[in-house]
């Protein structure tokens, strides 16, 4: 493993998806998968041993969900960056995982190129949201800016506001 490679820990409860993602990332020169976990508890145990730069975290897992795991990882290992990887395009989930400390939100229907782009962006201390997730966050921000009121489940969290400020400053990658 080259010293400039991005070390990634993958966390997902679907083995075939996890193995496929690992295989696809193995073809990327700048990325090295240093570990795989099938759930949040396993990820928490693996992190100290594999020392990843980035943890790519599924949100809906049976043993410990990705939001709770993200919160715990962010508290215990603040230097590690977390990207949420989800099939859900849900305002509440996006808000909760960003508030928990995730630096990115990528949908599982993305291309491998977009996935790699997200990993590279987050590794450079940028925030990365897939276009569909960014649209939701931006719509909520614009509504608030115009003096509108969000439904309780759509209110922007402090972390989401931080992500928006970074996006407004141009600290994001092209989609």
Image (cartoon, rainbow, N blue to C red):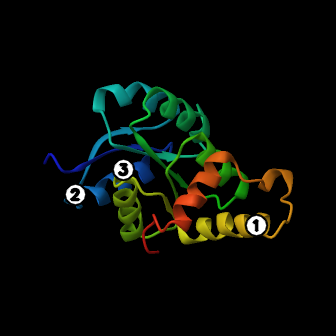
- Give the side of residue 151 with respect to residue 9, left or right: right
Mark closer to the chain start, 2 or 1 = 2
Mark 1 — residue? 145
- Camera-side mark, 3 or 1: 1
Q: Position of residue 46 (x, y in %)?
A: 37, 29
Residue 118 numbered mark, or none: none
Q: Quadrant of residue 7?
A: top left
Q: Does 136 sit above or below residue 100?
A: below
The CA span between labels 2 and 1 is: 39 Å
Mark 3 — residue? 19
| Nearer the observer, 67 or 167 | 167
Q: Quadrant of residue 140?
A: bottom right
Q: Position of residue 153 (x, y in %)?
A: 80, 51
Position of the N terminus by quadrant? top left
Residue at the extreme bottom of the image, as rendered: 175
Q: Position of residue 133 (x, y in %)?
A: 61, 65
Graded by Cα atoms within 10 Å as few (under 14), some (14 to 19) or many (20 or more), the crowding at tag 2 reads some
Graded by Cα atoms within 10 Å as few (under 14), some (14 to 19) or many (20 or more), the crowding at tag 1 reads few
- Camera-side mark, 2 or 1: 1
Mark 2 — residue? 30
Residue at left 53%, top 38%? 70
Q: Would you say residue 159 is visible in this rendering?
A: yes
């Amino acid at each position: 493993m080259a010293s400039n490679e991005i070390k990634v820990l993958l966390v997902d409860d679907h083995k075939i998806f996890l193995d496929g993602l690992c295989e696809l990332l193995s073809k990327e020169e700048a990325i090295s998968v240093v570990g795989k976990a099938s759930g949040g508890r396993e990820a928490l145990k693996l992190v100290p041993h594999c020392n990843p730069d980035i943890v790519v975290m599924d949100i809906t897992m049976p043993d410990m969900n990705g939001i709770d795991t993200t919160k715990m990882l962010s508290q215990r290992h603040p230097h590690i960056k977390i990207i949420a990887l989800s099939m859900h395009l849900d305002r509440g989930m996006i808000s909760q995982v960003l508030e928990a400390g995730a630096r990115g939100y990528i949908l599982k229907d993305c291309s491998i190129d977009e996935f790699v782009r997200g990993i590279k962006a987050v590794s450079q201390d940028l925030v990365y949201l897939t276009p569909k997730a960014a649209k939701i966050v931006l719509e909520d921000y614009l509504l608030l800016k115009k003096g509108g009121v969000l439904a309780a489940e759509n209110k922007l969290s402090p972390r989401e506001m931080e992500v928006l400020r970074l996006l407004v400053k141009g600290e994001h990658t092209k989609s």
